Image: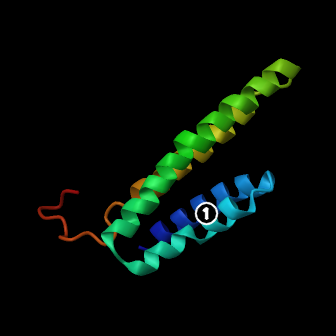
Amino acid sequence: MIWRIVLVVLAYLLLAAHFMRFGALLPTALLALAPLLLLARRRWSVIALQAGLVAGVLAVWLPSTVDFIALRQATGAPWLRLAAIMSGVMLFSLLAAWSLRPLFARKPPQGGTL
């Protein structure tokens, strides 16, 4: 269970660092503190954190990736490594969201299936 929490904390800190890069202090603070919702140990808190990570991928990482690649292409700079790194960041965030799924479930899975 600890590794799942570590993944979520790192994914949210990565998202917070992206906002801090642009000087947006309120979103930075909110994102950095978001994993504290796990202390509530409720299903809604897990769902909220999952939704936040998925929204982060769709609303922050994906548009940023497209913008960064377009900027690199416009200046003639190499962009393939950037695309690979940003794809890794998006996959990491989605993995962190997925890893939260079994936390604080109402009923444990039966029959060995998730």
Number of callouts: 1
Q: Nearer the viewer, residue 57 or 48?
A: 48
Whether residue 13 is visible to the viewer of this picture, yes or no, is: yes
Q: Residue furthest left?
A: 111
Q: Nearer the viewer, residue 41 or 92?
A: 41
Q: Nearer the viewer, residue 96 or 33?
A: 33
Residue 78 horizontal/vertical position (percent): 81, 26
> Which secondary structure, mark 1?
helix
Q: Residue at x 33, y 74 (%)?
A: 42
- Above or below, comparing residue 104 to residue 83 in the picture: below
Q: Residue at x 75, y 56 (%)?
A: 24
Tell me the quadrant of the picture where the C terminus can be found. Answer: bottom left
Q: Quadrant of residue 62?
A: top right
| Label 1 CA crowd tier, 10 Å (few <14, some 14–19, many 20+) | many
- Above or below, comparing residue 4 to residue 66 in the picture: below
Tell me the quadrant of the picture where the N terminus can be found. Answer: bottom left
Give left or right: position of 52 versus 12. Answer: left
Q: Residue at x 34, y 60 (%)?
A: 101
Residue 52 horizontal/vertical position (percent): 49, 55
Residue 95 horizontal/vertical position (percent): 47, 52
Whether residue 76 is visible to the viewer of this picture, yes or no, is: no
Q: Residue furthest front?
A: 26
Give left or right: position of 24 versus 48. Answer: right
- Above or below, comparing residue 10 to residue 39 in the picture: above
Query: As shown in the figure, which amino acid type bears the numbered disc 1?
Result: Leu
- Identify the residue position indicated by label 1 in the image: 31
Residue 67 horizontal/vertical position (percent): 72, 30
Give left or right: position of 46 versus 12. Answer: left
